Image: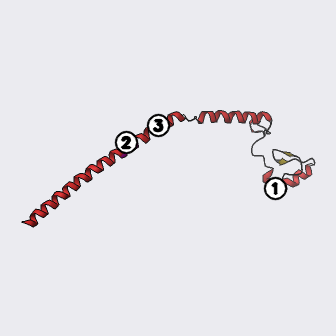
């Protein structure tokens, strides 16, 4: 969107001649509607002045400080190392148990083969 060539206030064009304002309001009324009762000071439009922008930045920085906790990378690394070591130990244990089970199964199969050979030889 191109910037208007006339003077603006809060992004809306201002008009030196009231007749042009009325014509613009007639053409596009939604651009010129005032959403709240402007007699109440709480509803008055506040231009984006330095004070307003500074207050907003301060408010957002306070929110960010409350919401964001910095990471403790040392603690995270220690936790990761402990998890990796436990996982490694668990996998060694699993492989050891699997080998024992395979050895027991192999002994059982060998004993069955011996029994079959004995039965065939009789």
Whether residue 38 sits left or right of residue 21 in the image: it is left
From the top left corner, tell me how far across and down residue 19 is, in percent.
92, 51
Along the polypeptide, which appears first: circle 2 or circle 1? 1
Q: Kindly state the secondary structure of the residue where label 2 is placed.
A: helix
Mark 1 and mark 3: Cα distance apart in space:
62 Å
Q: Kindly state the secondary structure of the residue where label 1 is placed.
A: loop
From the top left corner, tell me how far across and down residue 23 is, in percent.
88, 55
Q: Kindly state the secondary structure of the residue where label 3 is placed.
A: helix
Q: In front here: 15 or 109?
A: 109
Q: Quadrant of the C terminus?
A: bottom left
> Which quadrant of the view contains residue 43?
top right
Which residue is the site of mark 1?
A: 28
Is residue 88 on the magenta stretch? yes
Main secondary-structure element of the magenta-colored stretch? helix
Q: Residues within 10 Å of mark 2 (few under 14, many from 20)?
A: few
From the top left corner, tell me how far across and down residue 22 is, in percent.
87, 52
Q: Nearer the viewer, mark 1 or mark 3?
A: 3
Magenta segment range?
Answer: 86-91
Which residue reaches farthest left? 122
Mark 2 and mark 1: Cα distance apart in space:
73 Å
> Which quadrant of the view contains residue 65?
top right
Q: Residues within 10 Å of mark 3 (few under 14, many from 20)?
A: few
From the top left corner, tell me how far across and down residue 29 is, in percent.
80, 54
Mark 3 and mark 2: Cα distance apart in space:
15 Å
Is residue 60 on the magenta stretch? no
Along the polypeptide, which appears first: circle 3 or circle 2? 3
**CB contact under 8 Å: marks 1 and 3:** no
- Which numbered disc covers residue 89? 2
Q: Quadrant of the N terminus?
A: bottom right
Q: Nearer the viewer, mark 3 or mark 2?
A: 2
- Which numbered disc covers residue 79? 3
Q: Nearer the viewer, mark 2 or mark 1?
A: 2
């Amino acid at each position: 969107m191109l910037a208007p060539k006339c003077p603006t206030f809060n992004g809306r064009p201002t008009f030196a001649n009231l007749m042009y304002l009325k014509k613009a309001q007639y053409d596009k009324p939604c651009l010129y509607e005032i959403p709240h009762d402007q007699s109440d000071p709480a509803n008055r439009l506040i231009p984006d002045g330095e004070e307003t922008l500074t207050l907003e930045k301060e408010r957002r920085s306070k929110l960010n400080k409350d919401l964001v906790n910095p990471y403790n990378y040392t603690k995270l690394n220690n936790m990761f190392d402990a998890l990796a070591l436990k996982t490694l130990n668990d996998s060694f244990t699993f492989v050891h148990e699997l080998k024992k089970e395979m050895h027991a199964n192999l002994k059982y199969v060998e004993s069955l083969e011996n029994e079959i050979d004995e039965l065939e030889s009789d």
